[in-house]
Image (cartoon, rainbow, N blue to C red):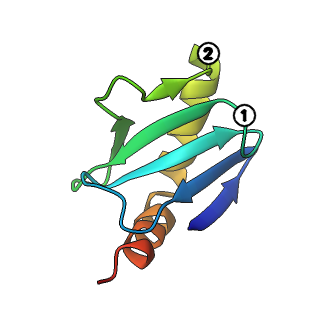
C-alpha cells in the first residue's frame, strides 16, 4: 500500500484496488474518519459514488479531504498508478 500525508489527512492507495481510480483519505491518520475520493480523468476530484464513501466524517472533514485531494491531485494519481502496475 502507498500513502501520502497532507495537512492532517493521510491518503492511501491499496494495491490492485478496484476501478474507478480512487483514494482513501483518513482525517488525523489511519483509524480516523474516512472519505473515499474519486480521482477523475478531467483532473478533478469528487466524493466517491458509493454507500461507504463517508465513514465517521462530518461535513467539515469531508470538505477538508476533498480540498487536500484537489491540491495533491497529481501526486495522488501517481500514487494510484504505482499501486496498479501489473
Secondary structure of the residue carrying tag 2 is loop
Instruction: Tell which of 60 and 48 is nearer to you.
Output: 48
Q: CA distance from mark 2 to mark 1?
A: 11 Å
In what quadrant of the picture does the C terminus appear? bottom left
User: Circle 1 sits on which residue?
Assistant: 32
Say whether residue 64 is left or right of residue 50: right
Q: Is residue 45 left or right of residue 71?
A: left
Horizontal and vertical percent for residue 1?
A: 56, 68
Image coordinates for residue 26, horizontal then vertical, percent:
64, 41
Q: Position of residue 33 (x, y in %)?
A: 66, 29
Residue count near mark 2 (Cα–Cα under 10 Å), binned few <14, some 14–19, many ≥20: few
| Name of the residue lying farthest toward the top | 58
Residue at 62% x, 20% y: name it: 56
Q: Secondary structure at mark 1?
A: loop
Give the percent coordinates (x, y) of residue 22: 37, 51
Relative to 61, residue 4 above or below: below
Residue 66 in the image: above or below residue 30: above
Which one is closest to the eye, mark 2 or mark 1?
A: 1
* Sequence order check, earlier mark of 2 and 1: 1
Foreground: 78 or 12? 12
According to the picture, the residue beneath numbered tag 2 turns out to be 58
How many numbered circles does the render carry?
2
Q: Residue at x 56, y 56 (%)?
A: 12
The one nearer the camera, 21 or 15, is 15
Amino acid at each position: 500500500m502507498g500513502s501520502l500525508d497532507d495537512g492532517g489527512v493521510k491518503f492511501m492507495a491499496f494495491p490492485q484496488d478496484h476501478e474507478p481510480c480512487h483514494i482513501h483519505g483518513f482525517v488525523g491518520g489511519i483509524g480516523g474518519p474516512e472519505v473515499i475520493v474519486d480521482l477523475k480523468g478531467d483532473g478533478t476530484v469528487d466524493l466517491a459514488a458509493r454507500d461507504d464513501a463517508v465513514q465517521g466524517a462530518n461535513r467539515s472533514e469531508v470538505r477538508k479531504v476533498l480540498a487536500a485531494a484537489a491540491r495533491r491531485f497529481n501526486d495522488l494519481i501517481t500514487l494510484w498508478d504505482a499501486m496498479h502496475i501489473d
